[in-house]
Image (tube, coloured by chain):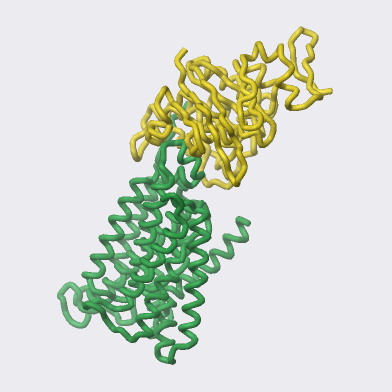
Amino acid sequence: MDSLPVISFREKLWLIASGAAVVAAVVLLPWIGTAPLTPERVLARQSPDYPIFVELRLSRTLLGLLVGSSLSLAGALFQAMLRESMATPYTLGISSAASLGAILTIIAGLPSILGLPAVWLGALAGAGSSVAIVAGASARQGQLSSFRLLLTGISLNGICSALILMIHSLAREHRSISILQWLLGNVDSVRYSALGAFAMVALVVFVIVVSRARQWNLLMVGESWAATRGVNPGRLMRIGFFCGSALTATAIALSGPIGFVGLIVPHIVRSRISPDYRILMPCSFLLGGVLLATADAVGRTVVAPAELPAGAVMALIGGPYLIWLVRRKF
Amino acid sequence: METLLQARDLSYSAGGKLILRGASFKAKRGEFIALLGVNGAGKSTLLDILAGLRAPTSGDVLLKGKPLADVQACERARWVCHLPQGVRGELPFTVEQIVLMGRYPHADRWMESEQDRAAVTAALERTHCLEFRHRRFSTLSGGERQRVLLAACLAQNAEILLMDEPSTYLDLRHQMHCFELLRSEASCGTVCIAVTHDLNLALTYCSRILVLQGGIVRHDMPVEEAWRHKSWFLEFSERLQVEHSWNGKAWIAYR
């Protein structure tokens, strides 16, 4: 009788390979872009190569990695909480509410509040409001259930989407273009202080959710199954909801609503690497970042000197994948 | 024998309907109890309350004399294990990953120990699941899935086993094997309560029967006594009667 490997050699290899892919992305992707850069000039800190590399390309790559990682992890989390393989970070209405908040600041013409871009704060405020509304409306006796969360989230999604359409149709031309650009979702260079704050949120949430990986496995089977194996599902749902919402809200605030990465990466990891959340979560976190940063690099080179938004590139990759998935699974 | 589980005057209502109205009983170490009753009698509801999945409208449950509500979730899972009527079939996990979940209350936060792995292998072997332990749960038949869930319960190594229709989907050989397993668990000092509609399985393998009717425990008797009284099984159907086979063994047949 051979022993049961809890985490197989193959799964460990995938974990290492995912980490290596992140390192490769950080090292290689900043060199990809319209303006050619030479390593000698960057290392010698010569202008314009050095500022382009550090202030534009590297920060953009890091943002792509962080946004992709956060959305993938949030997708994996919501798929466990809702036991719904088609759940995404946006299923519970956070994306629509964040978009509504951002669009209101665009319409108001606010460039910045307290030194921070107003769009970020608008998106965070929108996302925060959606968390309060969804949690408040779906909680019963302090407990969240996946069914009530899903119904409330879908309803909020519909309301916010309708309001966005209404505002967009009434907006003046230049504001309308800004709204559209934001809704497409894009990865752009940001200040390192903002990246640092985002990285802190992502890492803290990562530690909180990955330390509960076995509980997500149990919840994936069912709330009763988890409860009779020693998990408090109501508490776990609350932790998951707030952690997933924090990841999604910060990602959307900095990049706009980028779709598909939170759906396809956990799916690929689940079917190709492991459904065990001890592997699925770290791999989704690492590979989601690599996928989005790569999509952004593709977007800035494929129609150079123009750029495709990373959100559009992800949709062009994710859409066909989803169709293939539907054909294969349903 | 020590009383492990006690239900005291349990009532439960849902949707304006009173499902349980004062159900009470005690279960002692070593007992294998068949929980019987017609559809809608409240068997699964009672099992859910005993497992802590639902709170009773009134009454309480004592685990080793301690109120169930005062027992922490993880400690409760080391004492009580619950086999649901079913779980969703399209789970992405392999058989061994599902059975490993039964070790959650015993393992540390992140990894299982050698002892956990040994318990899982033993449970897989006892339920005849070892040969397909690497297969995905979603690719199994209904009966195979049921055996995997039973294996997860056995791996949990709890002192009280609450089984909601454990023989569902199983072929005849595995129905008997399942009840033999549960009887052997009871003989090792656990309490096993199994909801079943198969009166012959209940009377062959269990030590005691509880019949729920109208939300209360209408009949509570040892199996030896159950063979002698017709009153309890006539509540299921008037067509039932006790027959004897060529070797003198009694069984319940229908006319």
Does the rendering let one see residue A261?
A: yes
Question: Residue extending furthest top?
Answer: B247
Residue A121 drawn at (x, y percent) = 31, 73
Q: Residue at x 51, y 44 (%)?
A: A221
Which residue sits at x=54%, y=23%?
B25
**Residue B11 located left or right of residue A227:** right
The residue lying furthest to the bottom in this view is A173
**Residue at 49 percent of width and 86 percent of height:** A169
Residue positioned 51% across, 56% down in the render: A148
Tell me if residue A303 comes above or below residue B108 in the rendering. Answer: below
Q: Nearer the viewer, residue A303 or B139?
A: B139
At which x and y percent is residue B141? Answer: 64, 38
**Which chain is depicted yellow?**
B
Q: Residue A78 lies in what quarter of the image?
A: bottom left
Relative depth, front residue between B244 and B54:
B54
**Residue A234 vertical position relative to residue B48 in the rendered view, above or below:** below
Q: Which chain is green?
A: A
Residue B37: x percent and y percent? 67, 29
Q: Quadrant of the C terminus of chain A?
A: bottom right
The image quadrant that residue B200 belongs to is top right
Instruction: Mark yes or no: residue A38 visible.
Output: no
Task: From the viewer's side, name the closer residue of B238 and B57.
Answer: B57
Q: Position of residue A45 (x, y in %)?
A: 16, 76
